């Protein structure tokens, strides 16, 4: 499994692990007091993340999580062991899932969360809510992929770190869009209509750059995001029409 590190502008460093199935990204964001790590990648990535931080010459002050899937929290325990003073942050809703409580709220789609949620020993030092600031990053609600998924919008330069709310591997797609070469987003997405709503909300931020959990970082991504939203909207509308036709006698 190859790991590559690349910088995007002054504040964003991508650490990408290529696996046999798909690439997995996590990001170091530079702040005045050190670095914020967004997601922790799959297992065994902690040494590469720590090496990237050393190369940047700054300490990792905090670890923030977009969601609790295994390919985003896999190295959390190892990193927490190496960095016991770094804060660990996750959204209030997703903290329940990190603790493997899969109960649903009454106002949520009543579908079981999907995908891989490994047993993680580390717990958050505090939870965050949409609208909160984590350094320069604003927490943005983006449920759908998972119930408590959040994205992070860098208010300095308009970079959107969207976790798995969108993907760019095999071409841009909204969480849950099916690709033959990348069926995992579709398989692991909790509620596709909610994911589509979230993608629309993220597009309204008009990001200058899009950084996701799987696939390359895109510059000036607005048109691409809107195209992905239109495609997913069409697909879900088609599916709803099909379902309506089958229940009509
Ligand atoms: Zn995921």
Image (cartoon, rainbow, N blue to C red):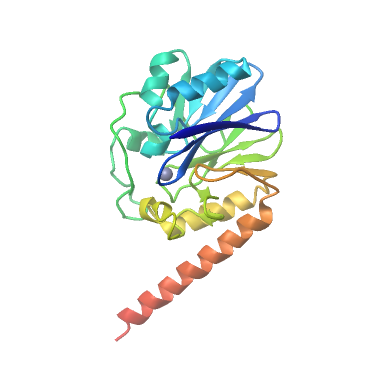
Name above or below for residue 122 compared with residue 229.
Answer: above
Could you say where residue 163 lies in the image, as x and y percent from the top left? 50, 42
Q: Residue at x 56, y 55 (%)?
A: 171
Could you say where residue 204 lies in the image, as x and y percent from the top left? 64, 52
Residue 136 lies in quadrant: top right
Could you say where residue 87 lies in the image, as x and y percent from the top left? 47, 20
Is residue 68 shown to the viewer in this render? Answer: no
Q: How many marks?
A: 0
Name above or below for residue 219 compared with residue 26.
Answer: below
Q: Quadrant of the N terminus?
A: top left
Q: Quadrant of ligand 1?
A: top left
Name above or below for residue 183 compared with residue 161.
Answer: below
Instruction: Please state if 27 lies on the left or on the right of 218 as rendered.
Output: left
Q: Quadrant of the C terminus?
A: bottom left
As drawn, the residue found furthest toward the bottom would be: 249
Relative depth, front residue between 81 and 33:
81
Name above or below for residue 18 compared with residue 180.
Answer: above
Relative depth, front residue between 32 and 126:
32
Q: Residue at x 63, y 31 (%)?
A: 12
Could you say where residue 70 lies in the image, as x and y percent from the top left? 36, 37
Q: Residue at x 64, y 22 (%)?
A: 31
Q: Residue at x 44, y 33 (%)?
A: 41
Is residue 120 shown to the viewer in this render? Answer: yes
Instruction: Please state if 222 lies on the left or on the right of 201 as rendered.
Output: right
């Amino acid at each position: 499994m190859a790991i590559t590190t690349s910088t995007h502008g002054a504040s964003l460093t991508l650490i990408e692990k290529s696996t046999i199935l798909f690439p997995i990204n996590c990001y170091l964001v530079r702040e005045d007091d050190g670095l914020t790590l967004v997601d922790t990648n799959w297992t065994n990535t902690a040494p590469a993340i720590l090496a990237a931080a050393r190369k940047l010459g700054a300490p990792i002050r905090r670890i923030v999580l977009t969601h609790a899937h295994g390919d985003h929290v896999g190295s959390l325990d190892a990193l927490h062991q190496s960095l016991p003073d770094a804060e660990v942050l996750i959204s209030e809703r997703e903290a329940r899932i990190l603790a493997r409580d899969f109960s649903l709220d009454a106002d949520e789609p009543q579908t079981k969360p999907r995908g891989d949620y490994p047993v993680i020993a580390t717990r958050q030092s505090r939870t965050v809510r949409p609208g909160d600031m984590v350094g320069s990053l604003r927490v943005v609600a983006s449920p759908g992929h998972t119930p408590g998924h959040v994205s992070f919008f860098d208010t300095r330069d308009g970079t959107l770190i969207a976790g798995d709310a969108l993907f760019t591997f095999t071409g841009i797609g909204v969480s849950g869009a099916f690709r033959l070469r990348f069926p995992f987003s579709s398989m692991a997405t909790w509620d596709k209509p909610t994911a589509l709503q979230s993608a629309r909300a993220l597009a309204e931020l008009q990001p200058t750059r899009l950084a996701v959990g799987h696939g390359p970082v895109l510059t000036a991504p607005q048109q691409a995001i809107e195209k992905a939203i239109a495609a997913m909207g069409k697909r879900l509308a088609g599916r709803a029409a099909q379902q309506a036709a089958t229940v009509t006698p």
